């Protein structure tokens, strides 16, 4: 797999200048898709803007000066994706990766009350040894539980310390969501109806705004109001 891609071919979610240079770093394979994440070296240089060159960004990473979800990243190509929390201890600053109202990845500065947990969507569930339930989350992490308490599409508030589940935000009418993919990516909406489709077709989510999308494009961010700080609305 190539370490770089042409900037003109970069996903439209990346907020980078397409014609400033020919190439841009490409993230390594991981839990996040290429559209919903960016390589650490680009995040540090182009989003955090704490250095001017990729070489300087790699040095910062090599010194273990950047944490993602509470752990120091080691690779410049490590994917940093939606809902990941980036902490720079040297600057005493933390950020959450989100989408702007125009569907671009962005970092939102957060305070200490938000830096030790993240929101994780349940993508799948499996039964493991002992009849326990393993939750497979959108960022690649897994949580094993004794009881089958949650549904796919629900979003968990998970603490980095011990992967403790702090809260659950179900996919249901009245929930506040971030549209993460599709033509309305970046929109904050309220669910009016969640329709379970019998058969192979995807379940449908309908919103107060009068449109609908499939389940995989929806990320619940709160029960009645957002549980996280959101980006400022772009004009």
Image (cartoon, rainbow, N blue to C red):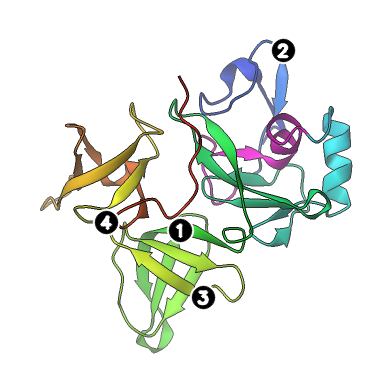
Sequence-first tag of 1 and 3: 1
Q: Quadrant of residue 46?
A: top right
Label 4 vs 2, first from the N-terminus: 2
State the SS at label 2. Answer: loop
Mark 1 Cα-neighbour bin, 10 Å: few <14, some 14–19, many ≥20: many
Quadrant that contains the N terminus: top right
- Crowding around mark 2 (Cα neighbors within 10 Å: few <14, some 14 to 19, many 20+) is few
Measured Cα–Cα span from mark 4 to mark 2: 41 Å
Magenta stretch: includes residue 33 = yes
The residue lying furthest to the left in this view is 198
Label placed on residue 164: 3
Q: Which residue is under mark 4?
A: 171
Q: Is 11 rendered above or below residue 156?
A: above
- Which secondary structure lies at badge 3? loop
Against 150, residue 172 (above or below) is above
Question: In the visual, does 140 lie left or right of 55?
Answer: left
> Marks 3 and 1: in contact by CB < 8 Å?
no
Residue 233 drawn in magenta:
no
Label 2: which residue?
A: 20
Q: Position of residue 184 (x, y in %)?
A: 33, 29
Residue at image location 57% in from the left, 35% down from the top: 106
For the residues bearing labels 4 and 2, Cβ distance under 8 angstroms: no
Q: Nearer the viewer, mark 4 or mark 2?
A: 4
Region in magenta = 30-49
Report the mark closest to the observer, 3 or 2: 3
Residue 107 sits above or below residue 65 on the image: above
Q: Secondary structure at mark 1?
A: strand
Residue behind mark 1: 120
Q: Residues within 10 Å of mark 3 (few under 14, many from 20)?
A: few
Q: Which mark is residue 110?
A: none
């Amino acid at each position: 797999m190539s370490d770089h891609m042409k900037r003109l071919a970069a996903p439209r979610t990346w907020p980078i200048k397409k014609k400033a240079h020919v190439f841009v770093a490409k993230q390594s394979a991981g839990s996040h898709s290429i559209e919903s994440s960016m390589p650490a070296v680009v995040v540090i240089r182009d989003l955090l803007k704490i250095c001017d060159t990729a070489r300087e960004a790699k040095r910062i990473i090599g010194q273990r000066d950047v944490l993602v979800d509470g752990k120091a990243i080691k690779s410049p190509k490590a994917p940093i994706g939606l809902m990941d929390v980036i902490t720079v201890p040297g600057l005493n600053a933390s950020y959450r990766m989100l989408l702007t109202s125009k569907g671009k990845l962005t970092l939102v500065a957060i305070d200490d009350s938000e830096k030790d947990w993240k929101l994780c969507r349940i993508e799948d569930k499996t039964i493991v040894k002992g009849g326990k339930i393993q939750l497979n989350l959108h960022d690649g992490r897994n949580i094993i539980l004794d009881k089958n308490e949650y549904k796919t599409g629900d979003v968990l508030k998970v603490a980095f310390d011990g992967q403790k589940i702090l809260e659950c935000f179900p996919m249901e009418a009245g929930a506040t969501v971030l549209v993460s993919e599709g033509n309305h990516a970046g929109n904050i909406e309220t669910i009016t109806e969640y329709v379970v489709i019998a058969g192979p077709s995807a379940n449908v989510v309908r919103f107060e705004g009068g449109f609908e999308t499939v389940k995989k494009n929806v990320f619940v961010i709160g029960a009645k109001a957002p549980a996280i700080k959101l980006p400022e609305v772009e004009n």
